[in-house]
């Protein structure tokens, strides 16, 4: 299985993602933002970080970068595109995913372990994961997901909500919402479920000595289901 | 505008009368304004170390593990297999008080540049921050701004902030401390230094453009504050972490090749100190055409260009003919790149602007001839002990005391702070903030590096010599407690006004204490900085040396953590408890006693106890370890319990001390360890063999901390205050 990680100036989880993909068997390559072509891939990943400094709206400049046209073409032809954290923000900026990511409710950067509930397993990203609740890690300042009422209805009707913040038992209520995200949304799909954007970082949870190992489940399933 | 230089203008630049006279004598003429600016930048306390140099020479800086000691951008130690750690701590106190966000952010940016200038990729950030009393009107905003600034910069660059320290004390009401530390990893055969070599080599400017920000920043950091500090805002630099991230990647890319002769970041005193340092170390001259310096603002004068402290800039001396190869890399990263001068054999700095020579100063006037003062100082006396009487303890209850101690702002959980720092990026953080030390793996190996920052201003204030020793020992203990072999330290020496004999004495004696302990423990100082003049309207801070220590774990799987592991295991305290309450958190909070000597340091015991812990771990005899520090044994146990949500039944103590002295005394050189029942015999035998004192403290069980009929308190009960104090303080 081949994967490509796009490096934007200011990306800072590119290496972590590279390490994780390789650990679970992907043949990964790094692609520079100023290139136009992406080598043949089964998966494209937009990693976390602060693309172009994120001084404007997060992800907005990356959403207009040179490489992004190829990402959009790949996605529109059904290719798997995964955006983590800043990658999620970029995907909403390109319009590949609905909604936006606002500043966290308490206006602080948050770095901690959280639990997320898998809301839809009929897709390649979560298909064979046995658990219903995963412990993952977030590290962001703008993870407060928001979309219009109409959009929300659409994404709910289409089963586009991928994961929601919850407690260990899977209760995705207000008390377990770290950043104020609408409906506790931590990650969403496009309509066809080939594009996933999520705030939590599975690549930081791939080893018992790190924050946890549930990220391993994510990558094991991903390579197995492609 | 041509300004004619005179004594008054020199004094406005922070120079003393006799210093100005010395400049005129050296030059045999009156300097022009650009030259005066250069002298003032090089001769201020911050850059010249004129009050401290004499004493810093005494620091213990050598050891088999040391590759580079003080005097370079950062210190370097060997961690085997060709790997080396580059690390340093630096203060950004004055700017952070004036503008907390930018002050703290650029502090982090500056120290990271010091590390990657040497060819290392930063792998961890730490910080030590000190604020005034929580009741002081400025404290909350300063804390909020500083934390946001540190996070804002480090998070963006993508380097984890793995540990730190936050203290509150009245003495910082008018002068907060922000000390930032960075560790980087480098191949020991690919280290870059600032020493220039060879003549006619191109001098290259890379990074951000030069603006008018931060002019006189270093001079501002060399003066005390008065009522007009708000006017100093323009001297604070503005950080751009995104550009620094690009600069980091571009520099590391260029360093992978062979074109760099020397490289130096533009930190304090910007282009002035970086160019002079390169030339001075290489015993060369340097010629710069200031017209070629990329400027952000129009009509900048040579004076402004030389003194700007705009961030994210580097100066590089390249091999001839490598310019286009280097430029390609900086173009790729969209950074400015300009050939602005060359090295010469003149041993002078010569500046040109619009085809005119605007400054010419022999390098040695600025470096070696910088003033050095043997300031007067007074030795501190050891304060008299308080004799606490039985009556003072009579009405006290252990549970009330414990609750009160656990919500002392210097003890409470600092999660509100470190949740705002990305501490897991780079995927190698195996011990997060909130433990004995932060630990990161050396990427792709079995090794890991531990790091922590410590300070003990209360002890240093009570008796600087003891305090100086104590901080080094505490740092050493933090390394031991995670199972790391202590390697070396970096020190950030924050003090008041060196022109006052008492403050100078505090400095001299703290340095002496640091030296004595680091020599004994083979824990050398390899880098650091001095921050004097932490004083506002005649009120100075308590002497606050911050010690950043690093240690090595050759197998990261052998790391020790502090949370209790299993019910039925036993807890021991290693090291003798004599119940020293003077200067303790207990004495201040419960007995309202603020006087007395700090706990004594016994370096022999310190070393022996520490080495013993490492040996016990080697034999797999300990499950958990936590050093005993502020708040004594009961505070340490509470923290271990809260982390694991497990209770402890304490056994009755015997001996001469009362239970308050025993449980809250701050005697040094102690560790609490957890032992499996089947290992008790081997464990005790090992300690006995080395005649190391130990007490069997208790057993892990239930969800309460219990001591006979005197103490029965649930973990939930103590957790609340300990965990929530800071959050509630900041939100309300």
Image: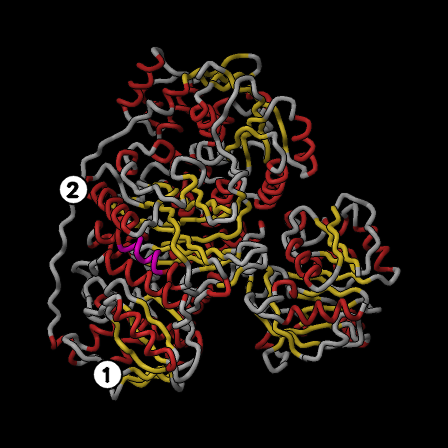
Quadrant containing the C terminus of chain B in the rendered view: bottom left
Number of the label disc, if any, that sits on residue B167: none
- Magenta stretch, main secondary structure class: helix
Badge 2: residue crowd in 10 Å (few <14, some 14–19, many ≥20): some
Q: Horizontal and vertical percent for residue B278?
A: 47, 27
- Name which quarter of the figure residue B143 lies in: bottom left
**Magenta-drawn segment:** B470-477
Looking at the image, residue A117 lies above or below residue B298: below
* Measured Cα–Cα span from mark 1 to mark 2: 45 Å
Q: What residue is drawn where x is 40% and y is 49%? A: B178
Q: Chain of mark 1?
A: B
Badge 1: residue crowd in 10 Å (few <14, some 14–19, many ≥20): few
Q: Horizontal and vertical percent for residue A193?
A: 81, 69
Between residue B445 and residue A92, name the one nearer to us: B445
Residue annotated with mark 2: B378
Q: Horizontal and vertical percent for residue B280?
A: 43, 24
Residue B424 horizontal side relative to residue B400, left or right: right
Residue B473 counted in the magenta span: yes
Q: Chain of mark 2?
A: B
Give the structural element (helix, strand or loop) at label 1.
Answer: loop
**Residue at far right of view:** A77
- Name which quarter of the figure residue A101 lies in: bottom right
Number of the label disc, if any, that sits on residue B652: 1
Q: Horizontal and vertical percent for residue B30?
A: 36, 13
């Amino acid at each position: 299985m081949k994967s490509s990680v796009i490096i934007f100036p200011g990306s800072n989880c590119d290496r972590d993602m590279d390490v994780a993909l390789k650990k679970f068997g992907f043949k990964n390559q790094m692609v520079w933002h100023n290139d136009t072509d992406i080598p043949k891939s089964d998966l494209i990943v937009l990693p976390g970080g602060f693309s172009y400094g994120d001084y404007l709206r997060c992800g907005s400049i990356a959403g207009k970068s040179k490489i992004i046209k190829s990402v959009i073409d790949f996605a529109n032809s059904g290719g798997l595109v995964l955006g983590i954290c800043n990658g999620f923000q970029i995907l909403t900026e390109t319009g590949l995913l609905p909604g936006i990511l606002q500043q966290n409710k308490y206006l602080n950067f948050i770095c901690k372990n959280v639990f997320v509930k898998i809301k839809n397993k009929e897709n390649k990203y979560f298909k064979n994961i046995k658990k219903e609740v995963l412990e993952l890690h977030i590290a962001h300042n703008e993870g407060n997901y928001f979309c219009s009422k109409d959009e929300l209805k659409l994404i709910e009707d289409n089963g586009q909500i991928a994961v929601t913040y919850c407690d260990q038992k899977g209760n995705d209520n207000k008390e377990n919402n770290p950043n104020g995200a609408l409906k506790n949304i931590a990650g969403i799909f496009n309509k066809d479920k080939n594009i996933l954007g999520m705030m939590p970082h599975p690549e930081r949870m791939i080893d018992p000595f790190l924050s946890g190992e549930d990220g391993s489940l994510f990558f094991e399933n991903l390579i197995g289901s492609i | 505008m041509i300004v004619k230089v005179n004594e008054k203008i020199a004094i406005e630049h922070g120079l003393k009368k006799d210093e100005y006279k010395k400049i005129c004598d050296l030059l045999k003429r009156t300097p022009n304004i650009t030259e005066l600016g250069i002298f003032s930048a090089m001769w201020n306390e911050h850059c010249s170390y004129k009050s401290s140099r004499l004493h810093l020479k005494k620091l213990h800086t050598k050891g088999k593990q040391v590759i580079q000691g003080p005097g370079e951008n950062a210190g370097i130690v060997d961690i085997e297999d060709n790997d080396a750690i580059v690390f340093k701590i630096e203060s950004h106190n004055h700017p952070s008080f004036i503008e907390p966000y930018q002050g703290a952010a650029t502090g982090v940016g500056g120290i990271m540049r010091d590390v990657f200038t040497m060819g290392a990729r930063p792998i961890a950030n730490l910080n030590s921050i000190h604020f005034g009393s929580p009741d002081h009107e400025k404290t909350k905003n300063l804390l909020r701004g500083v934390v946001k600034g540190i996070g804002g910069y480090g998070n963006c660059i993508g380097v984890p902030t793995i540990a730190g320290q936050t203290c509150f004390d009245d003495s910082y009401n008018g002068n907060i401390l922000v000390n930032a530390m960075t560790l980087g990893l480098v191949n020991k055969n690919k280290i870059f230094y600032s020493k220039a070599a060879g003549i006619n080599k191109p001098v290259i400017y890379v990074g951000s453009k030069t603006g008018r920000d931060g002019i006189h920043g270093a001079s501002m950091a060399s003066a005390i504050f008065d009522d007009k500090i708000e006017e100093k805002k323009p001297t604070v630099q503005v950080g751009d972490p995104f550009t620094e991230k690009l600069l980091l990647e571009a520099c590391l890319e260029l360093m992978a090749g062979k074109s760099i002769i020397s490289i130096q970041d533009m930190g304090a005193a910007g282009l002035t100190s970086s160019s002079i340092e390169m030339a001075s170390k290489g015993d060369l001259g340097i010629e710069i055409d200031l017209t070629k310096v990329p400027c952000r603002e129009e009509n900048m004068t040579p004076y402004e260009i030389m003194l700007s402290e705009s961030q994210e800039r580097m100066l590089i001396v390249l091999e001839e003919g490598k310019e286009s190869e280097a430029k390609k890399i900086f173009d790729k990263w969209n950074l400015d790149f300009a050939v602005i001068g060359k090295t010469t054999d003149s041993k002078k700095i010569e500046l040109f602007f619009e085809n005119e020579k605007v400054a010419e100063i022999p390098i040695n006037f600025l470096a070696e001839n910088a003033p050095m003062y043997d300031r007067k100082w007074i030795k501190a006396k050891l304060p008299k002990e308080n004799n606490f009487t039985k009556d003072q303890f009579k009405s006290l209850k252990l549970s009330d005391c414990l609750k009160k101690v656990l919500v002392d702002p210097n003890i409470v959980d600092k999660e509100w702070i470190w949740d705002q720092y990305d501490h897991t990026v780079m995927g190698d953080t195996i011990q997060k903030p909130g433990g004995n030390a932060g630990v990161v793996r050396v990427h792709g190996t079995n090794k890991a590096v531990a790091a922590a920052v410590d300070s003990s201003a209360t002890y240093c204030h009570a008796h600087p010599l003891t305090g100086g020793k104590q901080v080094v020992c505490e740092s050493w203990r933090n390394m031991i407690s995670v199972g790391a072999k202590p390697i070396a330290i970096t020190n950030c020496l924050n003090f008041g006004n060196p022109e006052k004999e008492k403050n100078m004495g505090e400095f001299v004696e703290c340095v002496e204490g640091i030296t004595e302990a680091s020599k004994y423990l083979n824990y050398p100082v390899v880098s650091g900085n001095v921050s004097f003049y932490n004083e506002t309207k005649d009120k100075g801070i308590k002497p606050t040396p911050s010690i950043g220590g690093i240690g090595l774990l050759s197998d990261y799987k052998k790391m020790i953590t502090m949370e209790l592991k299993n019910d039925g295991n036993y807890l021991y305290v290693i090291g003798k408890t004599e119940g020293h309450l003077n200067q303790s958190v207990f004495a201040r909070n419960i007995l309202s006693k603020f006087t007395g000597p700090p706990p004594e340091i016994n370096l022999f015991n310190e070393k022996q106890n520490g080495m013993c812990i490492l040996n016990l771990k080697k034999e797999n005899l300990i499950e958990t370890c936590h050093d005993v520090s502020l708040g004594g044994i009961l505070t340490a146990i509470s923290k271990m319990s809260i982390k694991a949500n497990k209770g402890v039944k304490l056994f009755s103590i015997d001996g001469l001390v009362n239970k308050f002295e025993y449980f809250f005394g701050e005697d040094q050189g102690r560790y609490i360890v957890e032992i499996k029942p089947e290992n008790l015999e081997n464990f005790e035998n090992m300690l006995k063999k080395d005649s190391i004192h130990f007490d069997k403290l208790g057993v892990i069980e239930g969800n309460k901390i219990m001591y006979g009929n005197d103490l029965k308190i649930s973990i939930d009960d103590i957790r609340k205050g300990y965990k929530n104090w800071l959050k509630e303080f900041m939100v309300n």
